[in-house]
């Protein structure tokens, strides 16, 4: 089986998007499939048009000249489609596998139609909701409605659709999309990267000033929808009930400046430590010194529909997790069993929940074991990738039956 992945961006850039992509491609290669990837104009400048990064083959698309919307987007789609077609004619895939956002699907569909190839469209989040979440869009605006319409159109045209969670699947079904063409390929953890957790890093704990302390933390990107302002607001009450409590924040992003100012004004500012961004290979060290990873996402359409990756990584690291009770978290965490859920957008509820968790340390080891077992059994990429196989085979068979003179020859597995 030969699969050409169509991506917004890829390694060596670091993001949740690129780590999921890496896990998928590595797991597919381990199954004996041949894979390659094309990244779009938004990946940015690259040192070469073709690169091998971490053993994965990426074909790059040159950035396009800036232009106001929608001209800029259409220019990107055209350039991306030309690059995808050139790569496909050389690589000769059985399947085109386009990953969100919708511009990637639009470019991929042009090539699929031209070459007679089947296309699978994988949605990790709806672009219009992601824009609202990161502060660059507004729900129900004209741009929001147009983007949503383009997404729905792309889903209707794709031969198969993958989504990362039930929330996205349910939303598409409510739009009138045939449920039979949608399958869930959930977020998972590459246990070759997040395998056995490191022992407690005493030197790092001393450097952070948390030796012997109770510690909560967040490791990830600082967007407003992550609710880190609520976590900082909860700290005075947490310190009052748990005098040795410290908060460690690892990462950065658009909300960082506002969060740093908020923390500096807190009466417990000395208990809040900003680490900044750290190299990916150092992340496990920070997991080792945090007792509980907290994910206080705000309640909004994006967080209700989409499951995050970070709680799964924390579970794989045998860390306790506590998260706001929104739809995306409920798909990952069983309250009181594999983690703790608290009311969203409520710092007092957050503080009470975390304080209660620290009062029940006798239950921690069993909860860690259950959470790790959940990741190994249900969210391990070596297991998750099998979900693609039957869909790929069906699409490849239908593509072979509908062969056309313009079609790139199918190469069987």
Image (tube, helix red, strand yellow):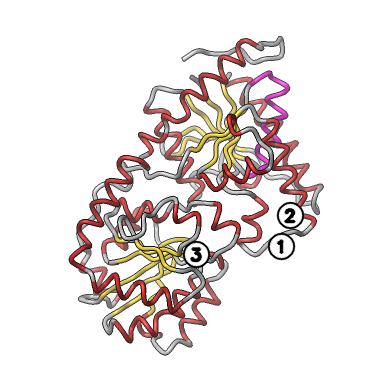
Q: Residue furthest left?
A: 362
Residue 316, position as x, y percentages in the image? 31, 50
Q: Quadrant of residue 105?
A: top right
Residue 389, position as x, y percentages in the image? 46, 25
Q: Is residue 289 above or below residue 146?
A: below
Front-most of residues 16 and 51: 16
Magenta-drawn stretch contains 110: yes
Question: Do callouts 1 and 2 mark residues in contact (Cβ within 8 Å)?
Answer: yes
**Which SS does the magenta portion mostly show?**
helix
The mark nearer the N terminus, 3 or 1, is 1
Crowd rating for badge 3 (residues with CA inside 10 Å; few <14, some 14–19, many 20+): many
Could you tell me if residue 49 is visible in this image? no
Magenta-drawn stretch contains 164: no
Q: CA distance from mark 1 to mark 2?
A: 7 Å
Residue corresponding to mark 3: 297
Q: CA distance from mark 3 to mark 1?
A: 18 Å
Q: CA distance from mark 3 to mark 2?
A: 22 Å
Instruction: Report the disc number at residue 144.
Output: 2
Identify the residue at image location x=38%, y=38%: 381
Q: The residue tagged with tag 2: helix, strand or loop?
A: helix
Position of 210 with respect to 398 (left or right) is: left
Residue corresponding to mark 1: 138
Question: Which segment did they paint magenta?
Answer: 101-117
Identify the residue at image location x=81%, y=54%: 68
Q: Quadrant of residue 82?
A: top right
Position of 90 with respect to 196 (left or right) is: right
Q: The residue tagged with tag 3: helix, strand or loop?
A: loop
């Amino acid at each position: 089986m030969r699969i050409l992945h169509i991506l917004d961006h890829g390694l060596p850039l670091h993001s949740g998007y690129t780590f999921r992509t890496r896990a998928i491609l590595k797991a597919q290669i381990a199954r004996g499939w041949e894979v390659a990837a094309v990244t779009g104009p938004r990946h940015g400048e690259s040192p070469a048009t073709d690169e091998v990064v971490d053993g994965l083959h990426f074909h790059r698309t040159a950035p396009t000249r800036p232009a106001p919307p929608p001209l800029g987007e259409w220019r990107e789609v055209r350039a991306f489609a030309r690059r995808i077609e050139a790569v496909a004619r050389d690589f000769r895939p059985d399947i085109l596998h386009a990953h969100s956002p919708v511009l990637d699907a639009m470019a991929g569909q042009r090539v699929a139609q031209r070459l007679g190839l089947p296309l699978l469209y994988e949605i990790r989040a709806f672009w219009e909701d992601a824009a609202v979440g990161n502060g660059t869009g507004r729900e129900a605006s004209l741009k929001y409605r147009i983007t949503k319409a383009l997404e729905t159109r792309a889903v209707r045209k794709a031969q198969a659709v993958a989504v990362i969670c039930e929330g996205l699947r349910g939303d598409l079904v409510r739009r009138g999309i045939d449920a039979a063409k949608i399958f869930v390929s959930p977020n998972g953890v590459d246990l070759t990267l997040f395998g056995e957790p490191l022992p407690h890093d005493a030197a790092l704990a001393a450097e952070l000033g948390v030796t012997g302390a109770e510690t909560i933390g967040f490791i990830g990107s600082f967007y407003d929808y992550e609710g880190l302002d609520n976590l900082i607001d909860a700290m005075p009450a947490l310190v009052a009930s748990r005098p040795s409590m410290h908060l460690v924040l690892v990462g950065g992003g658009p909300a960082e400046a506002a969060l740093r100012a908020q923390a500096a004004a807190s009466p417990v500012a000395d208990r809040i430590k900003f680490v900044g961004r750290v190299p990916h290979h150092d992340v496990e060290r920070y997991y080792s010194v945090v007792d509980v990873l907290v994910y206080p996402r705000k309640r909004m359409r994006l967080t209700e529909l989409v499951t995050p990756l970070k709680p799964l990584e924390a579970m794989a690291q045998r860390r306790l997790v506590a998260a706001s009770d929104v739809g995306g978290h409920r798909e990952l965490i069983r309250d009181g069993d594999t983690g703790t859920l608290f009311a969203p957008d409520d710092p007092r509820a957050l503080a009470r929940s975390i304080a209660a968790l620290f009062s029940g340390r006798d239950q921690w080891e069993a909860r860690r074991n259950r959470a790790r077992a959940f990741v190994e059994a249900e969210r391990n990429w070596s297991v998750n990738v099998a979900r693609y196989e039957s869909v790929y085979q069906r699409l490849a068979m239908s593509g072979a039956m509908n062969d056309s003179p313009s079609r790139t020859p199918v190469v069987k597995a």
